[in-house]
Image (spheres, rainbow, N blue to C red):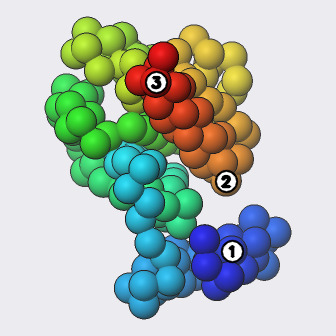
Amino acid sequence: MSNEAQELLDGFETGRIPLLEFIRSAKRLQDEGKIANDPSLGTAVVTCFGRHSEGRDLMSVLLMIQGFTVVSADRDSTLEEIVDMCRDPEVTVLCMSVQTTYDCPESLQMSDMLMDAGIRERIVLNIGGAAISESVAERAGCDVYSATASGSVRKIKEEVLNRTRERTEQCFK
């Protein structure tokens, strides 16, 4: 991560940089080539429910800063459309942002839907937002949980890297 990207992230995490300025500044750094994708991390699909596009957009930028290629789903994407996006073999992460408990029942189905599609084992699942607690995340089958978006992204990256390392070790056994 470039120094500029780290400074931007630090400023956001400490509350010195507001959300919209953070998002605009991160996109500018990406356009300037100061934020680059790390192909070893793969692609993250990021979606939202209940018009919670701010959470989706925040997670997209945080994942981009960490080196993921990011695909943002439309606000009105169905669960089936989201699963279809995850069928791409480059997808390693699915982040879902929910704003209210009304949205939670839909999100609780995603782990099972990924399992039914035969792709669950390669997808790191994260569901977050104000309505999500650690117990809700566990019930939903999430691989990682944090009370903050930044914390979630750090855990997501760590989990993707751990899975990559485990697959590599299996190849050499």
Q: Is residue 26 left or right of residue 19?
A: left
Coordinates of residue 24 in the picture (x, y in percent): 49, 81
- Residue position marked by numbered label 2 in the rendering: 150
Sequence-wise first label, 2 or 1: 1
Q: Could you tell me which secondary element the residue under label 3 belongs to?
A: loop
Coordinates of residue 15 in the picture (x, y in percent): 78, 71
Mark 2 or 3: in front is 3
Q: Is residue 150 visible?
A: yes
- Residue position marked by numbered label 3 in the rendering: 172
Amino acid at pointer 2: Ser
Q: CA distance from mark 2 to mark 3?
A: 34 Å
Contact? badges 2 and 3 (CB < 8 Å): no
Mark 2 or 1: in front is 1
Amino acid at pointer 3: Phe
Q: Is residue 34 left or right of residue 15?
A: left
Q: Could you tell me which secondary element the residue under label 2 belongs to?
A: helix
Q: Residue at x 64, y 84 (%)?
A: 4
Mark 1 or 3: in front is 3
Quarter of the rendering containing residue 117: top left
